[in-house]
């Protein structure tokens, strides 16, 4: 049984086996099934997220605040998926890393940047929906595109800071894996204290801190949406439609990523020897494989959700790729309105007479 390379195979295997008699080997299906899976989600995800970014960039109207956050989320997913084929090659070669030390750091940087930036983009989206529906008048000035762009820039910088352990400790080193020495791209921490400190950054800043913020905003948003839709103003109805898409994207993200973070926290407890036992170690290793790749699949789902749930996004797609049809629709509606208006005026004038 192997651990995915994205989840620090060398260190994890060493820490799990040092001082114990637990032995584990890699099933051959990992080198075939997982390679195909990673390549498929990489290709689909790159195409879908490029499509989303093209729609947002080519559309004539400027992006709304929510669309700015969603476009940055698509960019984060695109970065992750663009580097996944390198891991597919590594898995196919039995976790041997042939691309050098710089690519080892860069590929893992893209993965962790996606983990951190995605959750904090969703935090910003949740706060924006909270201000739009729960307190629309109090924070109207803050809901401006320039502040949204500044928030996205801060999220990218914050994600880069949190990825510091990856840049410092991730390297290509010889490791005895499955009874053979090979170059593996792995984290090489100097001691257990540094290991627990650096590995604890992910669950704390990538899960424990942002999730309560998202949960509180979601609770308030759901309460606001429970009002009768007919009582909302036209602008609030537009916000309602945007919020529906956001809530679906948020729910999908949680389904894909919460299991990963739970297993990550259990893994830290095993490393700290709070929990022990070969059976538990085997379960953690297996769950880590499954939930890591489930989390990656979220990057493919987001663009699909935009098309299925997002009515505004579908309208933007038609305006970008079928502008003639859209102009024809607008011309027809404008012509009908001009025909109706004189008729109404004539009837009102006749009534007066």
Image: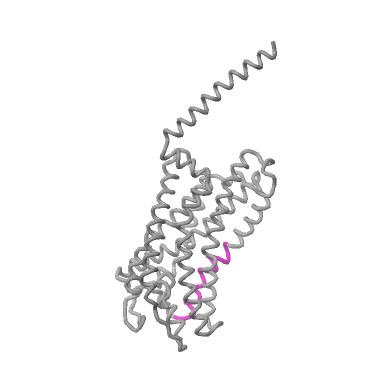
Height in image: 5 above or below 70?
below
Q: Residue 126 occupies which quadrant of the picture?
A: bottom right
- What x and y, as percent, mark residue 303? 46, 52
Considering the whole magenta stretch, tell me its main secondary structure. helix
- What x and y, as percent, mark residue 243? 58, 49
Is residue 160 in view from this perspective?
A: no
Quadrant for the C terminus, please: top right
Along the line of sight, the residue nearer the viewer: 10 or 314: 314
Residue 204 inside the magenta-drawn segment: yes
- What x and y, as percent, mark residue 112? 45, 65
Quadrant for the N terminus, please: bottom left
Height in image: 15 above or below 46?
below
Residue stretch in magenta: 191-210
Question: In this rendering, would 105 be left or right of 280?
Answer: left
- Residue in the image at 43% along x and 85% along y: 23
Query: How many numbered tags mark residues here?
Result: 0
- Residue in the image at 52% along x and 55% along y: 121
Along the line of sight, the residue nearer the viewer: 152 or 134: 134
Q: Residue 324 occupies which quadrant of the picture?
A: top left
């Amino acid at each position: 049984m192997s651990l995915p390379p994205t989840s620090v195979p060398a260190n994890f295997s060493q820490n799990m086996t040092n001082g114990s008699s637990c032995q584990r080997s890699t099933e051959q299906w990992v080198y075939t099934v997982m390679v195909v899976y990673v390549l498929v989600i990489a290709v689909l995800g790159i195409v879908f997220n490029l499509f989303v970014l093209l729609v947002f960039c080519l559309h004539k109207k400027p992006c709304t605040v929510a669309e700015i956050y969603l476009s940055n989320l698509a960019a984060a997913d695109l970065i992750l998926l663009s580097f996944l084929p390198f891991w597919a090659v590594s898995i196919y070669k039995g976790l041997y890393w042939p691309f050098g030390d710089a690519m080892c750091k860069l590929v893992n940087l893209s993965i962790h940047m996606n983990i951190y930036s995605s959750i904090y983009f969703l935090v910003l989206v949740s706060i924006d929906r909270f201000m739009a529906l729960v307190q629309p008048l109090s924070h109207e000035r803050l809901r401006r595109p320039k502040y949204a762009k500044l928030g996205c820039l801060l999220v990218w910088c914050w994600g880069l800071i949190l990825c510091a352990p990856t840049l410092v400790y991730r390297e290509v080193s010889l490791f005895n894996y499955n009874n053979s020495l090979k170059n593996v791209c792995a984290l090489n921490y100097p001691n257990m204290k540094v290991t627990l400190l650096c590995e604890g950054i992910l669950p704390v800043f990538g899960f424990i801190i942002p999730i309560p913020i998202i949960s509180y905003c979601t609770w308030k948003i759901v309460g606001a949406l429970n009002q009768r839709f007919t009582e909302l103003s036209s602008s609030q109805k537009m916000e309602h439609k945007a919020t529906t898409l956001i809530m679906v994207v948020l729910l999908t993200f949680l389904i894909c990523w919460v299991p990963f973070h739970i297993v990550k926290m259990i893994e830290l407890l095993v490393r700290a020897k709070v929990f022990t036992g070969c059976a538990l170690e085997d379960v953690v290793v297996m769950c880590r494989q499954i939930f890591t790749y489930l989390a990656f699949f979220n990057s493919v789902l987001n663009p699909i959700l935009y098309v299925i749930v997002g009515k505004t996004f579908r309208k933007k797609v038609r305006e970008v790729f079928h502008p003639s049809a859209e102009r024809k629709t607008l011309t027809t509606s404008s012509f009908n309105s001009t025909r109706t208006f004189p008729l109404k005026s004539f009837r009102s004038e006749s009534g007066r007479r």
